[in-house]
Image (cartoon, rainbow, N blue to C red):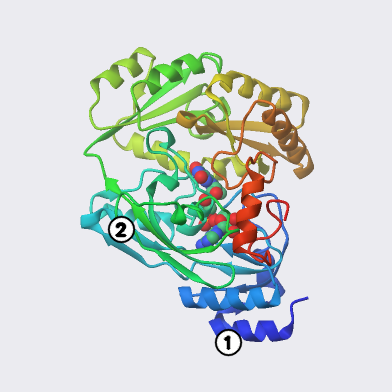
């Protein structure tokens, strides 16, 4: 139980409108887009770094756990509270573009698509884009070190962070406001991918780059998963901007024919890439068809979810390039022996697959998810873009994390239960 006195003090900080502890609302905050749920004891909605700081000072002095939350679109359970106060960051949503510097400052609760729109007014964009662009917040995306399409050429969101503002578990406000495309040290980087365990991110200075003058998307149909590795290497040698994979079921869900497909996005005119892709049977998507394809690709997860109980197996798998065919065969074998249907799609340029398991029974879907995760770990895979990878024990370097956690959060109040502490 949380002491009444603590709740009263929280109300003093954020006001009664931004403190919620009615069970109807806290229930909504007790889960995220993962299959897991916990219990939120209260929800607070801060509006400034100072309010975040006061909340954390209070929680720290009462040793009460706090879980930062963006949109709750994470699929690894990162924002699931276990008898914790949820810090809903969505009210902190200011966006400011420094167009001449090609930098955008965004508060943690701003939605990624709003940042994209603000930047596009100046002909700028940030290449890593998740399928959850229209719902995910900047803070949640950064805390997960999310990525999405365009990973090979541009990397994950980590590569686009110039500076960060954060609040440490004891309430200390840290500002690292670099507005440059190169920034020294690692201070601002320790919060990236830490799933809200080391500090609450309140603002991010993102690097942006110019929107290319033109771009083209090609679809290449595949005969089999076995031929994918060689074909992929030919495509990657042209240094494409994005390469996505859709198995036959995902292709059908996207309105394509029932074959596996690869989508290749190329910025600008690239004759050599066009030659290579058309020799592989690739066809350019024309006119409105291109935008339509990417819009549908963005909502593919939601489309699949309509077909039953959907569980993302281990969120996503970053697979060694040499094991593409083995990984896909393994997932198909799991599908064959179980009672679930599995859609495989993902960001092929980084060999990052999302097996979306659909079943009428949650238990059946979870059974398949666990089996895939167990088999995948033996193939040297890991989690690619969904936080720390602790859910399925794919994480490495835990001793170092534990020490960092202890240095910054001795009372273990911030998103506890990770790193085995
Ligand atoms: C349909 C769909 C498609 C997706 N596609 C992709 C994809 O292509 N690529 C990809 O990378 N991900 C993808 N994701 C998952 C992805 O993890 C999230 O969408 C996004 O990164 C999380 O943003 P959020 O605001 O919802 O964070 P939440 O889910 O609320 O939180 C995620 C984690 O970050 C922490 N956190 C949140 N805000 C803060 C903060 N301000 N400070 C510190 N910690 C914080 C939370 O405690 C939690 O651990 C997808 C999810 C869905 C539902």
Residue marked by disc 1: 12
Q: Calculate the distance from the C-alpha at mark 2 to the C-alpha at mark 1.
A: 34 Å
The residue drawn where x is 45% and y is 52% is: 186
Disc sitting over residue 179 in the figure: 2
Label 2 element class: loop
Above or below, comparing residue 330 to residue 181 in the picture:
above
Mark 1 secondary-structure assignment: helix
Residue at x 55%, y 83% (from the top left corner): 13
**First in sequence: mark 2 vs mark 1:** 1
Residue 63 placement (x, y as % from top left): 70, 73
Q: Tell me where residue 220 appears, x and y as whole percent.
A: 42, 21
Res 29 quadrant in image: bottom right
The local crowd at label 1, few if under 14, some if 14 to 19, many if 20 or more residues have their Cα within 10 Å, is few
Task: Provide residue 417's location: percent of width, then percent of height.
Answer: 71, 56
- Check the image and report above or below for 279 versus 152: above
Q: Tell me what residue is drawn at x 63 percent, y 19 percent.
A: 326
The vertical placement of 52 against 374, above or below, is below
Q: Residue at x 62, y 24 (%)?
A: 327
State which quarter of the image contains the N terminus: bottom right
In the displayed structure image, the side of residue 271 where residue 264 appears, left or right: right
Figure check: 411 above or below 323: below
Disc 2 residue crowd, few under 14, some 14–19, many 20+, Cα 10 Å = many
- Front in this rendered view, residue 151 or 401: 401
């Amino acid at each position: 139980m949380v002491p009444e006195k603590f709740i009263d003090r929280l109300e003093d900080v954020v006001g009664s409108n931004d403190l919620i502890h009615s069970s109807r609302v806290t229930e909504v905050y007790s889960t995220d887009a993962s299959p897991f749920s916990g219990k939120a004891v209260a929800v607070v909605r801060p509006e400034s770094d100072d309010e975040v700081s006061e909340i954390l000072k209070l929680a720290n002095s009462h040793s009460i756990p706090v879980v930062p939350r963006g949109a709750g679109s994470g699929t690894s359970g990162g924002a699931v509270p276990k008898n914790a106060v949820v810090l809903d960051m969505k009210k902190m949503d200011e966006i400011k573009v420094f167009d001449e510097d090609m930098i955008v400052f965004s508060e943690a609760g701003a939605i990624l698509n709003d940042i994209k729109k603000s930047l596009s007014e100046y002909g700028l964009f940030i290449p890593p884009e998740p399928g959850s662009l229209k719902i995910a917040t900047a803070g949640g995306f950064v805390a997960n070190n999310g990525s999405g399409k365009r990973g090979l050429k541009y990397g994950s969101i980590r590569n686009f962070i110039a500076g960060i503002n954060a609040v440490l578990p004891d309430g200390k406000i840290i500002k690292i406001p670099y507005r440059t495309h190169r920034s020294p040290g690692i201070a601002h980087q320790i919060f990236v991918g830490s799933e809200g365990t080391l500090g609450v991110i309140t603002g991010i200075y993102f690097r942006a780059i110019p929107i290319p003058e033109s771009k083209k998307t090609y679809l290449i149909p595949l005969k089999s998963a076995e031929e994918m590795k060689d074909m992929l290497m030919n495509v990657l040698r042209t240094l494409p901007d994005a390469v996505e994979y859709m198995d036959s079921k995902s292709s059908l869900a996207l309105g394509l024919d029932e074959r596996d497909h690869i989508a290749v996005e190329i910025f600008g005119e690239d004759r050599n890439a066009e030659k290579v892709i058309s020799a592989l049977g690739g066809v350019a998507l024309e006119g409105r068809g291109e935008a339509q394809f990417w819009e549908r690709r963005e909502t593919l997860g939601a489309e699949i979810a309509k077909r039953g109980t959907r569980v993302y197996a281990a969120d996503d798998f970053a697979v060694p390039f040499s094991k593409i065919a083995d990984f896909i065969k393994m997932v198909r074998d799991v599908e064959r022996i179980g009672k679930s249907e599995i859609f495989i799609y993902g960001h092929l340029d980084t060999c990052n697959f999302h097996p979306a398991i659909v079943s009428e029974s949650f238990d059946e879907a979870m059974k398949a998810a666990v089996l895939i995760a167990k088999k995948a770990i033996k193939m040297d895979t890991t989690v690619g873009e969904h936080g720390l990878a602790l859910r399925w024990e794919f994480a490495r370097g835990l001793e170092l994390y534990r020490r960092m956690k202890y240095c910054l959060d001795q009372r273990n109040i911030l998103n506890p239960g990770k790193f085995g502490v």
